[in-house]
Image (spheres, rainbow, N blue to C red):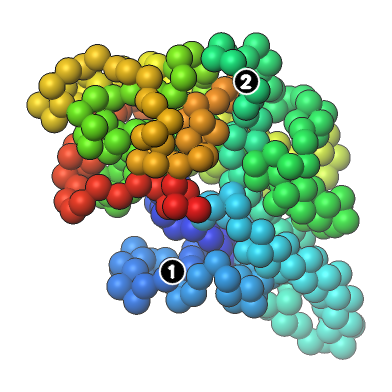
């Protein structure tokens, strides 16, 4: 019997995960979409699509309660949708204990129920996409921070401030983990800068596209401050592959496996400074004849309005350094193009094909 999977956020990362799971043929997938047109698109691929959005608490709770596996890749900052998933998982955990008693009764009376029997032993698995910005160094100064986080040291991550980006939701998940214990398996993912584009779905990430659009508008690529701050990077398809690889590990792990106690996963294939990102963008746009110089510059604060407004230094100007030690110990290796080549061959063509007037990030307006 195929496992039931619910993907909340079938966009940039979520769509890649869906494609990988479909290719394996072992999962029946449901997702939540906002547009009628998307329903038909997904159902053509064999995915059940339900109309709704992140604020539909009951819908998300019900879909989560019915699913063996839940991915939340929509946003790292929508508490209510994460709470809805946790409510569904808790509901399912309660039903699991109830199911066991009912099935034993039915067997004693010579009756059975296929749906109830199939639920036995299937604990909820929840993979939640937070973000590496929870680790970000926003201290004054323009030099790279020496502190590097490892996902093999959960205590290092647990020591983060409760007010760090995304942390409010992460803490809600950690609280649910403690409450449910072995009745569910929940993990928090903290990917860094995600890059790369899937030509099939035409989806793009956030930071690098925003900096590229900015460079097109202003005629020159740039960076915040001195550009010496560094972030990890990962290709979107390498990230999706990591999700699926870890899913299989979770599915097969015994309750006694101590690795299940660590709730965190990083995923990175290296790191770059923001000055290096600016140079990649500048060279790419210059070769494409969209700007007149490949040289980069420090972006003045007066132009932050065309990036992320007051949040610009936090989004594309701070340090965030981590190492995906758990994934590498499981044999995961990045296979996709590096950030420079992927920008030239994947991201840039998609960005140059965009039409319409320049639009800054919604964060710039908040």
Query: Dot 1: within a 10 Å radius of its alpha carbon, few (fewer than 14), some, or many (20 or more) residues?
Result: many
Residue designated by label 1:
33
Residue designated by label 2:
140
Q: Along the line of sight, which residue is nearer the eye, 148 or 323?
A: 148
- The image quadrant that residue 162 belongs to is top right
124 relative to 12 in the view: left or right: right
Query: Dot 2: within a 10 Å radius of its alpha carbon, few (fewer than 14), some, or many (20 or more) residues?
Result: few
Would you place residue 3 above or below residue 275 in this image? below
- Residue 191: x and y in percent read 55, 35
Q: Earlier in the sequence, mark 1 or mark 2?
A: 1
Would you place residue 133 above or below residue 248 in this image? above
Distance from disc 1 to disc 2, alpha carbons, whole Å, reads 41 Å
- The image quadrant that residue 350 belongs to is top left
Q: Along the line of sight, which residue is nearer the eye, 224 or 278?
A: 224
What residue is rendered at 73% in x and 77% in y?
116
Residue 131 visible to an observer of this rendering: yes
The nearer-to-camera label among 1 and 2 is 2
292 relative to 303 in the view: left or right: left
Rendered-image quadrant of the N terminus: bottom right
């Amino acid at each position: 019997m195929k496992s039931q999977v619910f993907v909340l956020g079938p966009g940039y990362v979520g769509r890649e995960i869906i494609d990988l799971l479909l290719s394996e043929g072992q999962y029946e997938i449901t997702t939540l979409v906002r547009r009628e047109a998307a329903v038909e698109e997904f159902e053509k691929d064999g995915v059940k699509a339900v109309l709704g959005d992140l604020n539909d608490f009951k819908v998300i709770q019900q879909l989560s309660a019915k699913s063996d596996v839940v991915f939340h890749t929509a946003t790292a900052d929508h508490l209510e949708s994460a709470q809805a998933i946790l409510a569904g998982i808790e509901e399912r955990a309660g039903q699991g204990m109830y199911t066991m008693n009912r099935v034993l009764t039915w067997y004693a009376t010579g009756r059975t129920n296929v749906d109830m029997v199939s639920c036995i032993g299937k604990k909820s698995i929840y993979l939640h996409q937070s973000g590496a910005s929870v680790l970000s160094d926003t201290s004054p100064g323009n030099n790279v921070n020496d502190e590097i986080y490892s996902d093999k040291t959960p205590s290092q991550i647990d020591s983060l401030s409760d007010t760090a980006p995304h942390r409010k939701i992460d803490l809600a998940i950690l609280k649910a983990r403690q409450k449910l214990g072995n009745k569910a398996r929940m993990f928090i993912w903290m990917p860094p800068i995600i890059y790369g584009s899937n030509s099939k779905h035409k989806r793009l990430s956030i930071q690098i596209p925003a900096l590229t659009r900015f460079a097109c508008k202003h005629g020159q690529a740039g960076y915040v401050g001195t550009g010496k701050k560094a972030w990890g990077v990962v290709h979107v398809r390498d990230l999706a592959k990591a999700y699926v690889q870890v899913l299989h590990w979770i599915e097969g792990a015994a309750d006694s496996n101590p690795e299940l106690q660590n709730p965190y996963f990083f995923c990175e294939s290296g790191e770059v400074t923001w000055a290096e990102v600016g140079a990649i963008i500048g060279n790419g746009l210059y070769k494409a004849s969209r700007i007149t110089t490949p040289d980069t510059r420090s972006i003045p604060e007066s132009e932050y309005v065309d990036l992320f407004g007051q949040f610009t230094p936090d989004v594309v100007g701070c340090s965030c350094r981590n190492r995906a030690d758990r994934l590498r110990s499981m044999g995961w290796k990045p296979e996709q193009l590096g950030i420079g080549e992927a920008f030239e061959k994947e991201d840039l063509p998609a960005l140059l094909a965009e039409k319409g007037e320049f639009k800054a990030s919604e964060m710039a307006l908040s």
